[in-house]
Amino acid sequence: MKFSIQPILENEQVILYPLQEEDFEALYAVASDPEIWEQHPNRDRWKKDVFRNFFDGAMQSKGAFKIVDKVTGKIAGSTRMYDYNEAENSILIGYTFYGTQYWGKGINKGVKAMMLDYLFRFVSRVYFHIGAGNIRSQIAISRIGAEKTGEQEVTYFGEKPKLNFVYAVDKGKWILNQK
């Protein structure tokens, strides 16, 4: 089924816009905080050259977003839809990060719910790759009902493979939990 992996999505807190090359400096201003990357598989992403590689991978994915705070108009972070698998009727969400000022405010849960609501119009399962050491993200993803289904070495764009945990949400379970 044909669908966009880069639609504009909006809820009461944020708007997801397709990431553009001209967003690099503003997104890097958010990503340049080392605290954001403490638990991520690549802890050096706060460095400009390392983040540039991450950003280039985001652009090539054609499924990356900038997350914009509706109150301030500033970029809050980024996320991505990628690796649509037509045979399995699944897709992945990942590469998500937020500026620390957005932590603990329900933004991530709202963004993931908005993305899942959109994607479940087209697929039956959504996966998430979460770094094995990223406890903060593992807790956050379990709060939306995702369940760990395995472990996988993931090669990020231009980087060495890193151990990730694989989480999944099935459409039927998501719909039941939203009632």
Image (cartoon, rainbow, N blue to C red):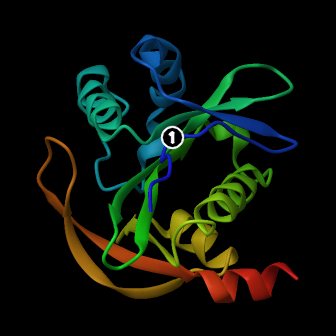
| Res. 131 image quadrant | bottom left
Judge whether 50 appears above or below 160 on screen: above
In the rendered view, would you say 48 is above or below 152? above
Residue drawn 63% across the image and 56% down it: 115
Percent x, y for residue 99? 61, 36
**Amino acid at pointer 1:** Gln
Quarter occupied by the N terminus: bottom left
User: Where is 158 relative to 177, above or below?
Assistant: above
Relative to 177, is 110 above or below? above
For the C terminus, give its image quadrant: bottom right
Residue toward you, 81 or 69: 81
Q: Residues within 10 Å of mark 1 (few under 14, many from 20)?
A: some
Q: Residue 15: x, y in percent?
A: 72, 35
Residue where numbered disc 1 is placed: 6
- At x 45%, y 12%, the residue is 25
Locate residue 141, reporting x and y percent: 59, 71
Identified at 62% across, 68% down, the residue is 140
